[in-house]
Amino acid sequence: MVGASGSRKTTLSRVLAEGIHAPLIELDALMHQPGWVPRSDGDFQREVDQATHKAPGWLMATTGMLLSTVPSGGAPTQWCGWAYPDEP
C-alpha cells in the first residue's frame, strides 16, 4: 500500500491485512527509531527481512520513499494499483 502521509493508508492497510489474515508491515515504523531518527540502510534492511520472514504472506505500507526496499531473497510481490478518475 503506497500513499502520501495522512492519506489513511495505514488505516486501510490494517483492514485489508485483517481481511486476508496477513500481518501488516509498516515500513515507516521499521525505518524510524524513537524521536523519528532513521536507521542506517543496513539496519533497516535487517528489520525488513526479519518482518517479512515471519510469515509466508504480508501486506506492506509505505509513503513511497521507502518503496525501493525489497525483502532479501527476492520475496514474490504482487502490486495492485488504483487511481481516482479525472474530475470533469
Image (cartoon, rainbow, N blue to C red):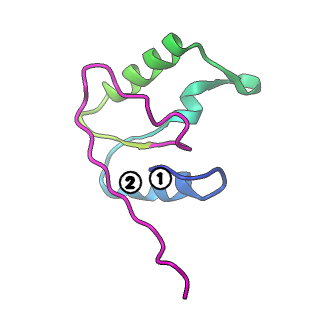
**For residue 55, what is the image quadrant?**
top left
The image shows residue 44 at horizontal and vertical percentages of: 51, 19
Q: In which quarter of the image is the C terminus?
A: bottom right
Question: Which one is nearer the viewer's eye here, 69 or 30?
Answer: 69
Label 1–label 2 contact, CB within 8 A: yes
Toward the right, the furthest residue is: 35
What residue appears at the point 25 percent right and 30 percent down from the top-left corner? 75
Q: In which quarter of the image is residue 23?
A: top left
Q: Name the residue under label 2.
A: 18
Point out residue 16 in the picture as x, y percentages from the top left corner: 39, 57
Write the residue at 60% across / 52% down: 4
- Is 3 above or below relative to 75? below
Separation of marks 1 and 2 at Cα, in angstroms: 6 Å
**Secondary element type, mark 1:** helix
Is residue 77 rendered to the left or right of residue 61?
A: left
**Label 1 neighbour load within 10 Å: few <14, some 14-19, many 20+:** some
- Report x, y in % for residue 11: 55, 56
Q: Viewer-proximal residue, 3 or 27?
A: 3
Q: Which amino acid does label 2 sit on?
A: Glu
Q: Residue 14 carries which label?
A: 1
| Residues in magenta, as a range | 61-88
**Could you say where residue 10 lies in the image, as x and y percent from the top left?**
54, 51
Q: Residue at x 25, y 26 (%)?
A: 74
Label 2 sits on a secondary structure element that is helix
Q: Residue at x 51, y 78 (%)?
A: 86
Magenta stretch: residue 67 in it?
Answer: yes
Q: How busy is the neighbourhood of tag 2: few (under 14 within 10 Å), some, or many (20 plus)?
A: few
Q: Outermost residue toward the bottom?
A: 88
**Above or below — where is 81 with respect to 87?**
above
